[in-house]
Amino acid sequence: MRTNVFACLILAFVTFLLPFSLTAADSPLKEVASPMIVDGNAAADSLYMREDYAEALAHYQIELENTQKPSAALYNNMGCCYYRLYSVGEAVLFFERASRLSPKDADILHNLSLARIKTFDRIDTDALYPNPLWHHIASFLGIKLSLTLAITATAFLCFGIICFFLARSRSWRRMGLYIAMGMIPFIVFFNLTTWHLSSAYMNNNMAIVMSEESPVRQMPTGNATIRYTLHEGAKLRITGDAVGNWLPITIGTGKEGWISQGAISRIVP
Amino acid sequence: MVMRRLFITASFLLAFCATLLGQISFTVKHENTASVGESFQLVFELKGEKGADFVGPDLDGLERLFGPAIDENIGDVITSEGSKYIQTTTYTYTLKAKKEGRYNVGAATVSAGGKKLKTKPFTIRVLPADKKSEWGDQIKAEDLYAKLILSRSEAYEQEAILATLKLYASPSVRIREIKALRLPDFEGFIAQEVVSSSVKQYQLERVGNRNMQTVVIQQWMLLPQRAGSFKIPTAAIDFSLAVSRGSQPTGRGNSDDNFFNQKGANYQVVERTVESKEMQVQVKSLPEPKPTDFRDAVGSYTMSLTPPSKTAQTGEPYRLTVTIAGVGNIKLLSAPTMVWPDSFEPYDNEEESTINVTASEISGERKITYLVVPREKGDFQIPPISFSYFDLKSGTYRTLKTKELDIKVEKGANSDLYVSGEDRERVDRLLAEDLRPLLPYKNSPTRLRAAHFAFGLPYILLCVFFALATVAVILFGLRYERQQADVINNRQRRAGRMAAKRLKQAYKLCDGGNPHDFYTELINAVWAYLGDKLYLSTSELSRNNIAEKLDVYGASEELSRDVISFLDEVEYARYAPIATTTRSDLYQQAKKVIIQMENIVKVPL
């Protein structure tokens, strides 16, 4: 009887520990920029400090070409240069790129919203997703938290099942059953938010308008009627494959159209 | 043996060399002889350590042209133990002797590595000069000088002052090349260089009672930035010049010919440095009271408004261009403040200026384009733009104003695309905070790890592991439980049979035999039975525990009492000298207790 309770406790402990041991095991994978790159960027940083933004940007661009995997910091700092040089479109694009790699970084988010102020179009960025509310909830949680909660809920489910089968006392068994049943909606919910965020990251088909002004047309031809006009820095979603030089886009339900490929830059380079 | 000794000596030598390299040395390199008028160098070299407090030598009348020029470098020295870095500092003097003779140059000192180091004093013999070198000495101060000429020594803030750096040379001096220009630092001013399209030309100018060759080296328009008294430091010009043979540096009539018709063989190249005098400028502050919209514009200006469009569309940028043109500090003009209606969202102004700096004035224009995006439709009135400047001619402030503007904002094609109600306060807060500092690169993510992990192979494996672990734990737990139950059951089931066996053994001793053996056998049988039946280990077997357990197992109080009293009785009989109860009685009692227990005590689950 006593040993049984003990076994249950150990089990609970192990299942609780799992998500943490997982993140710990993942940490050696953390990719750190090589020291060479850090040195090269230091020169650019000091140029930026001296307000020589064009020269700093040129340095960063060399770094960007030389790195296989640019870091969020590099994108952010390039965005800062563009912002200072009044290139709103590029500034938004690079802050978006930085934010994609590090979505919960407060500095990057601040810079991004600052750059967005300088754009003419006030578009609801959540509306770019098919289900804006769902995107809003998921991005509020963030992928790290979603994933951790999904795994923790799974661990609780296992714990509940084990309790149900092994506990001696009836109250414990009942508790185990409730825990297991209660975890199922959580597991579904957090896995769905994780799924949404990870696919939004993996298949990112957002783009930023680079040209000062670009018409969005009804049809993929140059003389089709203009539905609306987007300005530099506006964010949009590409919904399909290009037809000639034209890409189908949307900035929210009912706001679809075709835009010239040359006028935009994808967030995923 | 010899070899060994040689080896030792060699290693000592090596060690010595190594210490030598590690040591600090301070030496002087010099020429033993020089000639009058010829420049030569003294080089003091400090090796092995950084030096401080260098004190130059006594030059004993030698003219110092330049120095000490300090040059620090770290060199790679290869020794037997590999390469090594050595710090070297050189202090170089460029000297010239004016007269022949012997010059005793004193010691130079420097402190390095916690010690004061000295060089050896030495002597330089200066030989009479070649005939040629005398020529350079013929140039006197009044034959060659530079001047920084200011158009005025007193000015208002922001009032342009023309500064001209001019070189004067007597006709006998022919300037070959300007080698270096050390320009003053115009502290307290904004200097705008006057760009002259023409090539620098020598001009003849009458200075006092002499004709001088003059050339303008550089010109600036200086804009004083604050009131006060300012010093403009000296400017220095290094150049090489040609001095004609036998020329008399006096203002002769034919000097013009003399200057330009030199033949190569008739002149010698001499290097010289001239410095302009320090200048003083008095800057007056602008009179008070200043108009409220005054933004440091000084000069004379006109303002014009590019005829704007009378209509605007919501969500579309609307531009309004104002041009301020005139003479004055155009570069520093700031855009006049605009007051837009609340529903007009202002963006950064586009500003562009064209400036023309000449020796007489700074003129040009500044085009300011205001950029707004109207967010609501309706009719709006834009208040006039006003611009104030300080007019230097009249010494008063003047204000320019544009007309009021009426703008009709129509609904744009884009208007339904926008999120309404941009939080103005939040925008202002963000703009006030500006960009955050640059991010450090260390540990900055290059990918979103969680997204790569989610639904990838490791994630699926983790879920499978969870499932397998749960099943395994449950199976293990159930099996363990069953085993445990088996152990208890077996003991309890077998307890009666075991007790019967042992009682039979005791029964054999009932008649005759050692009574002590009988009691021992009897009591052991009962204890063992109780242990098995009540699932108690040997250490737990006590009267209290038994009573407790019997209670748990649901035995009657009577039975419990019987068991305890039986145990007491046997113990008593075992040690009592005279038996009060017969052995067979006790045996019967034991049998009775066990049978009773067998009937009542059921294996609990």
Image (cartoon, rainbow, N blue to C red):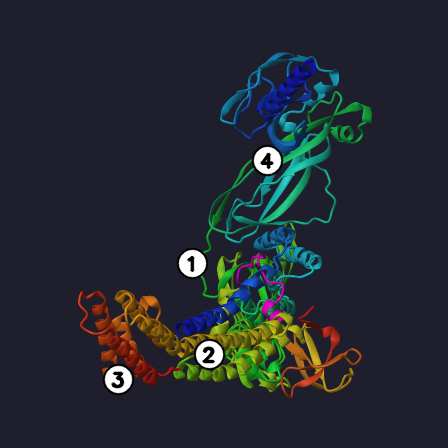
Q: Which residue lies most toward the top here?
A: B101
Eye-nearest disc, 3 or 4: 3
> Of label 1 and label 4, which has the lower sequence position?
4
> Label 2, label 4: how many angstroms apart (C-alpha)?
100 Å
Circles 1 and 2: CB atoms closer than 8 Å: no
Tell me the tag on residue A166. Answer: 2
The kind of residue tagged 2 is Leu
Q: Which residue lies most toward the bottom here?
A: A254
Whether callout 1 and callout 4 share a subunit is answered yes
Q: Is residue B437 magenta?
A: yes
The kind of residue tagged 3 is Ser
- Label 3 neighbourhood size at 10 Å, few (<14), some (14-19), many (20+)? some
User: What secondary structure do most residues of the magenta stretch adopt?
Assistant: loop
Magenta segment boundaries in residue numbering = B435-453
- Label 1 neighbourhood size at 10 Å, few (<14), some (14-19), many (20+)? few
Q: Is residue A100 left or right of residue B157?
A: right
Expressed as whole percent of the image width and height from the top left, the position of residue B194 reads: 65, 49
Tell me the tag on residue B472. Answer: none
Tell me the tag on residue B556. Answer: 3
Whether callout 2 and callout 4 share a subunit is answered no
Circles 2 and 3: CB atoms closer than 8 Å: no
Q: Is residue B56 visible?
A: yes
Image quadrant where residue A171 sits: bottom left
Tell me the tag on residue B276. Answer: 4
In this rendered view, identify the residue nearer to me: B201 or B546. Answer: B546
Q: Quadrant of the N terminus of chain A?
A: bottom left
> Label 1, label 4: how many angstroms apart (C-alpha)?
37 Å
Tell me the tag on residue B288. Answer: 1
Expressed as whole percent of the image width and height from the top left, the position of residue B278 reads: 54, 37
Q: Is residue B345 visible?
A: no
Eye-nearest disc, 1 or 2: 2
Q: Which of the chains bears the disc numbered 1?
A: B
